[in-house]
């Protein structure tokens, strides 16, 4: 379970080549703007008619000079200060207002929540540019005021982000625990909530900065900015007047603006990836590893696909030397099941028991060829009616799944699609697999719902998953599992998510259906009670190996392997009841308990 | 007879339902319960029975609509936020999910010292507790920097807190170097031990244990349960042990209360309630849990069938006797 700690977000950022390059450009631009006066000997405002529209490199003007003979590079450096400061002002206002109001609304809620929500909606409904133009008409061409007002408009977005994040953190158990520990609300906010919020805010700030730069430049290009102030947008505006004589003047401020905005977007994206934390294996790596596994296996496989292996008459499923592995981010393969053999005969219930991480669920999924992204069968055979399932095409496998092998999941609710009625979800696979009409399928579905002892099948048929209880949903899934009369049902902890009384009903139902239909069941579980209740045979898994197997009654009586012994030893003895409570020496408590 | 430590009387908890004039949802419908010092009271029930709500109400995390909760005779149901924070010293919690109950961004030391440094707890030394002057409760609202600052007189220093954290880790059988690691480096059982250590940090008198072993593997579960028992025997802390697992409740509780649909339907000594249940629901609940023994389970299964049949007959008769018209709710059969 405990692997080496993943690197911190900052470390991850440093490992991302895009982030490093983009970050370097941003830092370079910002430093250049800060130290502008030291880098250039020109005065950005000084006009020099002799240098009018000087070309690049003429008279020491590295990027040339504009129509008034002012040095373009110097103006870029000085203008950058105003442009960037204006954007920072917007973002600062947005983050300050948005964070504080979002924290209060998200954490304390009540009347402030609805008030601030409506205010935010109002702000977001206002057209930003129009407001800024109106503001300019009232307060004059001050770019600082306009950027501050724009920040106010942007704050609605920050508010929503912070509020949503805080609301989700507030319901975390560790915040409850902190509250129980006696921490004040402010302390909880500073210690637990802000930590979670700051990442998303940082990302959003980078995006907002880009927007603010764009809006600011837009105002200035329209000629509505402060004419006295040098800025990138102002330079574009100036150059626009000379677009026929000196189009090159448009280029430099546009390039700088675009570069700066591009870098902000890219760094925000990298930040998001870095803060996301989970290291996912990229699809490319998965494909590469998958090809490599396929190549390895092709060399090893003796039988060609389609060749039948002889199996005993009553043998349904035979797994030989099954190895399962997952592709890791560094393109290595992590093996989690290390070559197991198992078999299931017709009409029997086989238990696969183990603790979390033992590979029992992965084994079940491998049989159905439903391993999640990046997982694959590394070696071994999964024999079904003489065919190796591991070698079948996706389409051939889809025919077997549902028709011959079906599945009952652990979480009934998340395995039903909330946007379809239960009836629709039952009918669809039957129409596909059994090629029957809609009316026939409906009749069959209602019949199935009756078979799983649902009292009012018509109503359940029309219901959406959220309208039924968890136990009912599991019955529906059992109905779906038996709908095409499979030979084998793989049940992955089918009662773990259910209450005890419901569990007993579901087990009873499974037993009844199993006996009626003669279907075999591979029961994945961690509960010895369920094994004792329903399984004919049981296999114990530990860390990717089957360590012991046998028929249920024998296994409960005698077991050899130390791990099996440990597991059986951990079963709480129902006979063992805690000794009664003893009154602590009364004198000890007399002092503390007021009479 | 020792006076009860915690007394819950006719407790009603209602949650508002969104919507104009919607009737609030009544999670607890008048529940009474008491816990004596050093006692473990098991609270059994299925999902939606209200058992977690009861625990949260005692912790001040659920609204008390009616009734009272008293600790040492003092009402703690609807009290000021400040008094509530002070009570955190006496009533602590261990939650079910060891993954979300620890802040993933904090080291174990930061997690465990949080309650210590937050409240200027009187420090525990070999002699026992220091007297805590009433003024110690006054705490500035926003002194979040205390973690790094040297302490004023009665505030625990960082070094002292670290020593206490080391002791706590030892108490829950974790290595001392666990301090510097993050929660994700630990397995479920180890995390639950950390959560127990956090609950023990302030030497509480009562710990609300909300399904603390349900998310753990079988062998881990047994060891953590033994740890709970051992800590109780040593420190005489009382538990309200909320669980749905009947074997667990039998193993750890002195007394058991069974909850069903927001009410306690049966309560008494563990042996009494678990061996000779009286309420039909308790009987059904007991019979539903499978025994980890194929032979005994076969018998239990048969017993359960007979019980359900007998209860169905009894219900039918009761329905016939009731002259008032009223269709028996079909919904109850849904499970």
Image: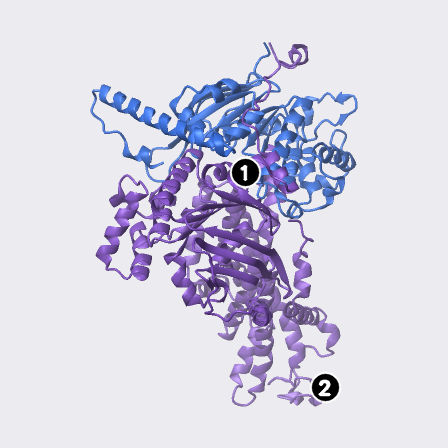
Chain colours: A purple, B blue
In the rendered image, the quadrant that contains the C terminus of chain A is top right
Q: Is residue A98 above or below residue A379?
A: above
Which mark's residue is nearer the viewer, 1 or 2? 1
Q: Is residue B269 above or below residue B204?
A: above
Residue B103, how many percent across, how many down?
62, 44
> Looking at this view, is A38 or A154 the one in front?
A154
Q: Is residue A155 left or right of residue A57?
A: left
Subunit ID for the residue under disc 1: A
Report which residue position mark 1 lands on: A554
Residue at 45% across, 54% down: A315
Calculate the distance from the C-alpha at mark 1 to the C-alpha at mark 2.
95 Å
Q: Tell me the crowding category of disc 1: few under 14, some 14 to 19, or many 20 or more residues within 10 angstroms, Cα based.
A: few
Q: Is residue A583 left or right of residue B58?
A: right
Q: Is residue A572 left or right of residue A431?
A: right
Among the 4 quarters of the image, the one containing residue A71? bottom right
Mark 1 touches mark 2? (CB < 8 Å): no
Q: Which mark is residue A60?
A: 2
Subunit ID for the residue under disc 2: A
Residue B299, how many percent across, how many down?
44, 29
**Label 2: which secondary element:** helix
> Looking at this view, is B55 or A296 the one in front?
A296
């Amino acid at each position: 379970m405990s692997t080496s700690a993943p690197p911190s977000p900052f470390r991850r950022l440093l490992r991302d080549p895009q982030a490093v390059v983009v970050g370097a450009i941003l830092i370079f631009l910002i430093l250049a703007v800060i130290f502008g006066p030291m880098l250039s000997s020109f005065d950005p405002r000084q006009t020099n008619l002799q240098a009018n529209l000087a070309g690049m490199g003429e008279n020491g003007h590295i990027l040339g000079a504009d129509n008034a003979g002012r040095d373009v590079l110097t103006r870029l450096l000085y203008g950058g200060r105003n442009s960037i400061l204006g954007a920072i002002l917007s973002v600062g206002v947005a983050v300050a207002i948005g964070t504080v109001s979002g924290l209060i609304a998200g954490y304390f809620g009540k009347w402030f929540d609805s008030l601030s929500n409506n205010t935010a909606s109002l702000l977001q409904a206002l057209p930003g540019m129009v407001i800024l133009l109106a503001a300019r008409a009232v307060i004059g061409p001050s770019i600082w005021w306009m950027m501050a007002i724009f920040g106010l408009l942007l704050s609605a977005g920050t508010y929503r982000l912070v509020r949503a994040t805080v609301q989700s953190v507030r319901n975390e158990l560790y915040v409850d625990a902190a509250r129980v520990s006696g921490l004040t609300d402010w302390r909880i906010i500073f210690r637990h909530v802000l930590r979670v919020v700051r990442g998303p805010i940082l990302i959003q700030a980078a995006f907002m900065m880009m927007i603010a730069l764009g809006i600011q430049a837009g105002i200035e290009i329209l000629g509505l900015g402060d004419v006295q102030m040098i800025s990138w947008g102002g330079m574009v505006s100036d150059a626009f007047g000379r677009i026929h004589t000196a189009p090159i003047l448009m280029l430099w401020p546009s390039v700088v603006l675009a570069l700066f905005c591009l870098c902000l977007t890219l760094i925000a994206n990298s930040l998001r990836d870095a803060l996301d934390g989970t290291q996912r294996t990229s699809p490319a790596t998965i494909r590469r590893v998958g090809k490599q596994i396929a190549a390895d296996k092709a060399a090893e496989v003796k039988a060609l696909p389609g060749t039948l292996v002889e199996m005993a008459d009553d043998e349904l499923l035979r797994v030989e030397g099954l190895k399962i592995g997952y592709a890791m981010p560094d393109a290595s393969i992590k093996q989690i099941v290390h070559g197991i053999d198992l078999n299931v005969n017709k009409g029997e219930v086989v238990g696969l028991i183990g603790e979390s991480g033992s590979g029992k669920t992965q084994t079940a999924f491998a049989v159905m060829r439903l391993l999640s992204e990046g997982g694959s069968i590394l070696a071994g055979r999964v024999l079904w009616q003489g065919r190796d399932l591991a070698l079948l095409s996706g389409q051939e496998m889809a025919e077997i799944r549902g028709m011959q092998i079906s599945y009952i999941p652990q979480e009934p609710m998340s395995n039903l699609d909330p946007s379809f009625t239960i009836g629709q979800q039952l009918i669809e696979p039957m129409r596909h697999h059994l090629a029957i009409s809609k009316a026939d399928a409906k009749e069959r579905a209602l019949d199935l719902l009756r078979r799983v002892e649902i009292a009012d099948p018509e109503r359940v048929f029309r219901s959406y998953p959220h309208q039924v209880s968890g136990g009912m949903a599991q019955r529906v899934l059992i109905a779906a599992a038996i709908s095409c009369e499979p030979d084998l049902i793989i049940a992955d902890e089918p009662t773990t998510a259910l209450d005890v009384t419901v569990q007993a009903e579901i087990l009873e139902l499974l037993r009844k259906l199993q006996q009626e239909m003669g279907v075999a069941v591979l029961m994945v579980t961690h509960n010895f009670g369920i094994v004792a209740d329903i399984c004919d045979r049981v296999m114990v898994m530990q860390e990717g190996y089957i360590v012991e197997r046998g028929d249920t009654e024998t296994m409960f009586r005698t077991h050899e392997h130390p791990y099996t012994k440990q597991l059986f030893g951990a079963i709480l003895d129902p006979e063992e009841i805690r000794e009664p409570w003893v009154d602590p020496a009364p004198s000890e408590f007399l002092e503390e308990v007021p009479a | 007879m020792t006076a009860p430590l915690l007394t819950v009387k006719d407790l009603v908890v209602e949650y508002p339902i969104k919507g104009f004039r919607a009737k609030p949802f009544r999670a607890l419908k008048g529940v009474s319960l008491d816990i004596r010092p050093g006692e473990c009271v098991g609270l059994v029930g299925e999902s939606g029975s209200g058992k977690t709500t009861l625990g949260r109400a005692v912790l001040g995390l659920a609204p008390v609509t009616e009734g009272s909760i008293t600790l040492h005779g003092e009402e703690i149901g609807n009290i000021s936020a400040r008094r509530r924070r002070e009570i955190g010293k006496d009533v602590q919690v261990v939650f079910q999910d060891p993954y979300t109950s620890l802040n993933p961004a904090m080291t174990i030391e930061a997690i465990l010292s949080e309650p210590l440094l937050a409240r200027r707890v009187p420090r525990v030394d070999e002699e026992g507790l220091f007297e805590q002057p009433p003024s110690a409760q006054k705490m500035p609202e926003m002194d979040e920097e205390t973690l790094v600052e040297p302490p004023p007189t009665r505030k625990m220093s960082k070094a002292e807190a670290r020593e206490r954290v080391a002791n706590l880790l030892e108490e829950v059988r974790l290595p001392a170097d666990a301090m510097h690691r993050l929660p994700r480096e630990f397995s479920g059982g180890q995390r639950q031990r950390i959560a127990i250590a956090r609950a023990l940090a302030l030497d509480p008198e009562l710990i609300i244990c909300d399904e603390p072993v349900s998310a753990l593997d079988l062998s881990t579960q047994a060891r953590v349960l033994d740890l709970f028992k051992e800590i109780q025997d040593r420190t005489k802390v009382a538990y309200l042990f909320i669980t749905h697992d009947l074997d667990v409740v039998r193993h750890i509780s002195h007394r058991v209360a069974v909850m069903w649909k927001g009410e306690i339907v049966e309560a008494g000594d563990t042996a009494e309630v678990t061996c000779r249940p009286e309420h039909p629901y308790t009987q059904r609940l007991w019979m539903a849990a499978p025994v980890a023994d194929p032979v005994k389970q076969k018998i239990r299964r048969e017993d359960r069938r007979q019980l359900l049949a007998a209860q169905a007959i009894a219900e039918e008769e009761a329905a016939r006797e009731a002259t008032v018209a009223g269709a028996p709710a079909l919904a109850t059969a849904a499970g």
